[in-house]
Amino acid sequence: MIFELIRLQFLKSLRSTSFAKSLLITIFLAFLALLLLSYVLMAGIFLSKILGVLAEGRDPLEVLSEGLIFFFLMEFMYRYFLQNLPVIDLESLLHLPIGKRKIIHMLLVRSFISPISIIALLLFLPFGLQEILPQMGVSSLIFWIGTILMISWSIHWFMLWFKQRFEDSLIGVVIVFGVLLLGGGSAYMGWFNLGEIVEPFFTWSLSSFIPLVLTSITCVVFYYMAYTYYLNNAYLEDLSKEEEAKFVDRDFGFFSRFGLAGEMANLEWKLIIRHKKSRTFLMLSAFFLLYGMIFYDNPQYHTEDGGFNFIFIFVGVFITGIFMIQYGQLFLSWNSGNFDFFINRKDGIEALVRGKYLLLLSISCLCFLLSVPYVYFGWKFLLIHLATWLFNAGVMIHLIIYLALWKPKPMDLNKGAMFNYEGVGAAQFLMIIPMMVAPYVVYLPFALLINEYAGLAALGTMGIIGILAFNKLSQININRVLSNRYEISSSFRQEL
């Protein structure tokens, strides 16, 4: 039966109307995966020397034992965004005369066959061969690397259960942010050193098989937990109907003050929270609000006289406009499945575009308000965020949407965002140019000739001018959609 299921999956891919495109994407992603894994292997080979340089005078094995917990916390984060069970395949198999248990086992094993599953092995096995094998022998190496692999694979099975159970709830978001705070925040703020707390466990694994047994049992328990959950919830009505009714009444009441455009903004918000890809973009925007932590408190980005580093302008644009940039780059692709509906309604296109404008501006304003705590690092950062937010709202939003309207492509909203290139064209790759160049075209002349605050004033002034001319600037993009609406509609009917 396992071979029969594999044959069905092969035929499904072979008979797809987009087989050639999928094959090329698969080849590209395979090449990218091999390239990244080769980098991981090289990092593992030189890990001992890297640790020797970073912690000069200390035993590399001791340093690594303290740092392993941070690797696993990072693994928890990237598995949350990259890893997923092929639930769509589950829906396509449930109606067949095949045992449900066999289907669940097949999909779980299939999810495990991934480059992510061998990252820990490639990174830490070379280190173990260099440091542990000569000093402590084969048994210590097996116990140590086995413990690391079992923890890594336990996270895999746990994440399959966690994402299906909590991905759409506030609890899931709180847990993910809690892990991020536990991993980076505790060490950054000096509350406690999590590495020192768990270091004895990894040291114990060098001399005893008990940690390997404990982590192996944990791995089996998490696999059974994921298997049981999917087995108990693998019904077509659970997979298709529950999500449709979950967010029916969740909207922003103040949007209703903006007439038909406000209603479109509310519909767009419901689209975001109902679908996997758009929700992922929203969550990534929340995570990227912490982007300033990398730069604002780092001495190497500060000048001796306390002035601005030019990179702070890019960081401010990125933080206050991250959702606008991510979501706006696929401006109409989000509506590829129902674009014809708006064509056939009076003022439908104009209301759709203005509604998207309203939503992007609202969330950009929210990003700015959430970035206010960066004033902790200095008032100048609040001024940077204010100026860049005004520039985003008055200028950048029109540039992003103008580029996004260049030959938009269809997109399946229920697929994940990671390594998914549906809706992405040349315009999306070129969009980085105005994001990088446009703010500096305004900022640099005034900053170099006068000072940094004059540059910020120029950015903010340009943004205010753009806000005052919002109706005329937005009408340019509305007219582009109206003039190309039938061509856009035709491209959206293409099979993915």
Image (cartoon, rainbow, N blue to C red):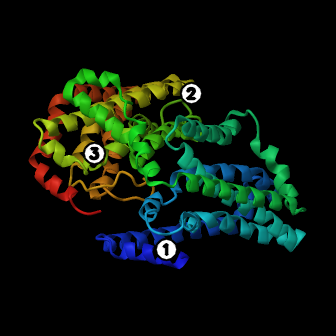
**Do the CB atoms of the residues marked 3 and 2 lie less than 8 Å apart?**
no
Residue found at x 21% / y 38%: 353
**Which mark is nearer the camera, 2 or 1?**
1
Q: From mark 1 to mark 3, how far is it between C-alphas?
A: 38 Å
Tell me the element at label 1: helix
Q: Mark 2 points at which residue?
A: 377
Residue occupying the point 67% across, 57% down: 224
Left/right of residue 449 with respect to residue 335 in the rendered view: right
Q: How crowded is mark 1: few (under 14 residues within 10 Å), some or many (20 or more)?
A: some
Q: Nearer the viewer, mark 3 or mark 2?
A: 3
Q: Examine the image and state in which quarter residue 444 appears.
A: top left
The answer to whether the residues at label 2 and label 1 have Cβ atoms under 8 Å apart is no
Circle 1 is placed at which residue position? Answer: 5
Residue 156 x %, y %: 62, 57
Q: Is residue 14 left or right of residue 36?
A: left
Q: Position of residue 442 (x, y in %)?
A: 30, 36
Residue at 80% in and 47% down: 198
Q: Position of residue 157 (x, y in %)?
A: 63, 57
Name the residue tied to disc 3: 331
- Residue 377 seen: yes
Pointer 3 local density, CA inside 10 Å: few below 14, some 14–19, many at least 20: many
What is the three-letter code of the residue carrying label 1?
Leu
Toward the viewer: 71 or 342? 342
Quadrant placement of the N terminus: bottom right
Looking at the picture, which amino acid does disc 2 mark?
A: Phe
* Residue type (three-letter) at the residue carrying disc 3: Phe
SS class, disc 2: helix
